[in-house]
Image (cartoon, rainbow, N blue to C red):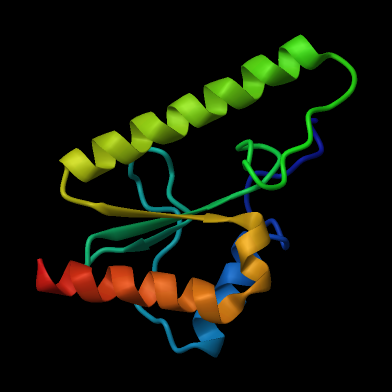
Amino acid sequence: MSLIRSRGNKATELRLIAIFREYGITGWRRNQPLLGKPDFTFRRERVVVFVDGCFWHGCPKCYKRPGSNQEFWDTKIATNRKRDRYVNRELRSLGWQVVRIWQHQLGKPARVASLVKRALESGLRS
C-alpha cells in the first residue's frame, strides 16, 4: 500500500485535468489548504471537486470487496465514506459547493464536464 500515490493519479486527477482542458473549464487550483484536501478548487465560484477512486471510496457501482482480510477492508472503506460525508457537510457549512466524481464517471467526459459547469454556474449566482 505504501506504493500507492495519493496525488497525480493518472486514472483520476490527471484525467480530470484533461477533461477540463478539452471542455474549456478554467479557473481551477490544486493543493488549496481546505478541509479534505479537494483535488480541484474554484475559489471565485466557491466550488470544490473531489475525484474519488471507486475502490478506495467504496463506489456502489464498482466496489468489489477483497477476498482476504475482509474485516480490515470493511472498516477502511466505511471510515473513508464517513470521512467523505463529514468533509462534504463541513465544506457546505462554510459556503462551498462540493462536487464528487467517481473514477468510473471519467469514462464519460461530456457528462463530467456538464456536472462541473453546472456547479460553477450555480456558484456564480450565489
Q: Position of residue 9 (x, y in %)?
A: 69, 56
Q: Position of residue 18 (x, y in %)?
A: 60, 78
Residue at (46, 25) in percent of width and height: 82
Q: Position of residue 114 (x, y in %)?
A: 43, 78
Q: How many marks?
A: 0
Q: Could you tell whether 103 is left or right of 30 in the image?
A: right
Quadrant location of the C terminus in the rendered image = bottom left
Quadrant location of the N terminus in the rendered image = top right
Residue at (72, 39) in percent of width and height: 63
Residue at (73, 20) in percent of width and height: 73
Q: Quadrant of residue 27?
A: bottom left
Residue at (43, 44) in percent of width and height: 37
Can you say whether 81 is above or below 59 in the image?
above
Q: Residue furthest left?
A: 126
Can you say whether 20 is above or below 8 in the image?
below
Q: Quadrant of residue 74?
A: top right
Q: Could you tell whether 40 is left or right of 34 in the image?
A: right
Q: Position of residue 87 (x, y in %)?
A: 36, 35
Q: Could you tell whether 125 is left or right of 87 in the image?
A: left
Q: Residue furthest front?
A: 61
Q: Residue furthest right?
A: 68
